[in-house]
Image: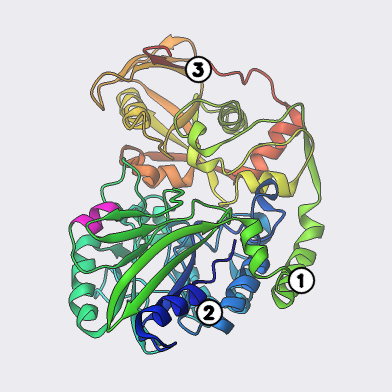
Amino acid sequence: MLKNFFGVLLTVCTLIFGSAVCSATQVVIFHTNDMHARIQDTDDGGKSIGLAQMAAAVKTIKEKNPATLWLDAGDTFHGLPVITMSKGENIVPILNEAGYDAMTAGNHDFNYGSKQLEKLVKGLNFPLLDANVVYKKGGKLLFTPYKIFELDGVKIGVFGLSTPECAYKTNPEGVKTIKFLNPVDTANKMIKILRPQCDVLIALMHMGVDASSEYTSERIARETEGIDIIIDGHSHTTFFDGELVNETLIAQTGCYEHYLGRVTLEVEDNKITYKKAELLDAEEVKAIAPEPDKKVLEILDKANAEAEKILSTVVGKSDRELKAETVFVRRNESELGNLTADAFRWATKSDIAIANAGGLRTGLPEGKITKRDVLAIFPFGDIVKVAEIQGSTIREMLEHSVEFYPSSFGGFLNVSGITFTYDSTLPPKQRVTEILINGKPLDEEKYYTIATIDFQFVGGDGYDMLKGLHMIGQFNTVDEIFAEYLDKVGMKNIKVGRITRLPKE
C-alpha cells in the first residue's frame, strides 16, 4: 500500500506549529540490486515485477516529490539471453529510459570484461559510481567515485563500492588490468570527503552479507562512522525492514526484481530525524502506478524481437525438469550439475570434469529445449578447456569446493569421473576423506586430464590451484556442448550420489 507520508508529515507539523509550515523534507530512495537482466514481468517464472512497471512507479513519485532518487546496486548488465546476446548493450537504453540516477558495478557486470563495461557506461545517461576500482598501471579510477545530489534543498552524497570478489567471481581474464581496493579503507576516504559537504551520505555497494565473504556491507558499517544508508547487493539477501548496524541502515531487495526497495528519510535542519527501509511487492508497485511505462516497454519489445529468431531455435529435449535453486546447488550436488559435468567429459574425452554451481543460473525445463533455455542456464559464454592436473591438486581442488559448507558457495563443484566423501565437521581444507577417479583410488602423484570452463582455469571462484595448468585442448562454449550432449546422449546416469557428505542428515 502506498503510504501518504507527506500527508502524515503535514498533519504532524500542523499540530505542533499550528500551521502547515514545516522545515522537514522527505527524501525517498528507491533501489534495486542483482537484477541479472530480469527486467520483464514474465522473468523468473513471473516473479519479477518488471522494469517498465517499476519505472512508472518511480516516475510517479518523482513528479510528486523532487527529493527522490533511484539507485541500482549492480549485477545488472548480464543474466538472461535477450541481454547477454548483445553483451549488455541493449539494456543501456532501457535503463536510461527507466530513469535511474546512479548505479554501481557488481561482479557479473564485469562478465564481458572491464573494457566492455567501460563502453556500456559511456552510453548511460547517469553515472556508474565506483570508488575502489582502479587500473593496475597508474592507479587511475575506472569510473566516477561519487556524486552529490542537491534535491529540494537537501544535499545527498552517494559513493560506490564493488566487492573485491570481482577479481575471481567473474572471469579473471576480463579484469586482469584492474584491481579492487580495500572497500573499508575506500569507504573511510569517501566519508572524509563527503560527510562535511552532505546532509545525507549513501554508500551504494555490491558487497553483500555472505558469511564466506571477507568484506561485507555489515563489516563496512561496523568499521566506519558516518554512512547513513547502505544500498547493497551481491548476496541476494531480502531485508524487508533493512538491517541497522552501527547506526547505518542497510537495505537490499533480494534479487531478480522480486521487490522494489524504498528507503524513506526525514531531514530537518540538515540532519536525519527519521529513516525507514521497506520492500514493495508487485501489487504495491502497481498501486503507485497501475500502468507500466510505455517507452520502456517499446524498447523492451524491440530488444525481444531482435533476439527471438535466434533464441527460439530448438536444440534438444529434456526428459524431466531439473531445478537449480541457488541456495541448494551452491551447497549440494545436483542433477543439473552432474549433467553439465558429464557433457564436459563427453565432449573432451577427459578423465574427469567439474562444473561450478555458480555457473548454473536457472533450471532446465521439461520438453523441447531451445537456445534460450540453454543460454538462460549458461549465460556467460565460457569456453570448455582441458588441462593436465596432478592427483594432489585434485585433492586441493575438492577441499576448496567444500571448505565453506554450510555457507553457500558459487564455487561448489559438481563432478564427473570422480566420487568423493567429505566430513563437514572437520576443519576447512581437511575435510575430504576418500577420492575415487573412475572407480579407482586417487593417485596423488599421477597426472590426469580435467575438463572445465576457462573461468575456473584462470582462478575463478578462488581456484588458484588450477591456474597455470598445462592446457592440452580447447572446445566449444558451455551452451553449445551442453545442447549437443542433451541432443545426442540425453539425461542418463545423472542421479546424485557422486558426493557423500558426513555426517549424513
Image quadrant occupied by the N terminus: bottom right
| Residue 498: mark | 3
State which region is magenta: 218-222
**Disc 3 to disc 1, how far (Cα)?**
45 Å
The residue singled out by tag 2 in the image is 124
| Residue 302: mark | 1
- Quick one: label 3 or label 2, which is nearer the N terminus? 2
359 or 76, nearer to the observer: 76
One can see residue 355 in this view = no
Q: Amino acid at mark 1?
A: Lys
Binning the other alpha carbons within 10 Å of mark 3 as few (below 14), some (14 to 19) or many (20 upward) gives: some
* Residue at image location 24% in from the left, 58% down from the top: 221
* Residue at image location 58% in from the left, 35% down from the top: 324
Please give left or right for residue 497 compared with residue 139 in the image.
Answer: right
110 or 235, nearer to the observer: 235
**Disc 1 to disc 2, how far (Cα)?**
18 Å
Binning the other alpha carbons within 10 Å of mark 2 as few (below 14), some (14 to 19) or many (20 upward) gives: some
Image quadrant occupied by the C terminus: top left
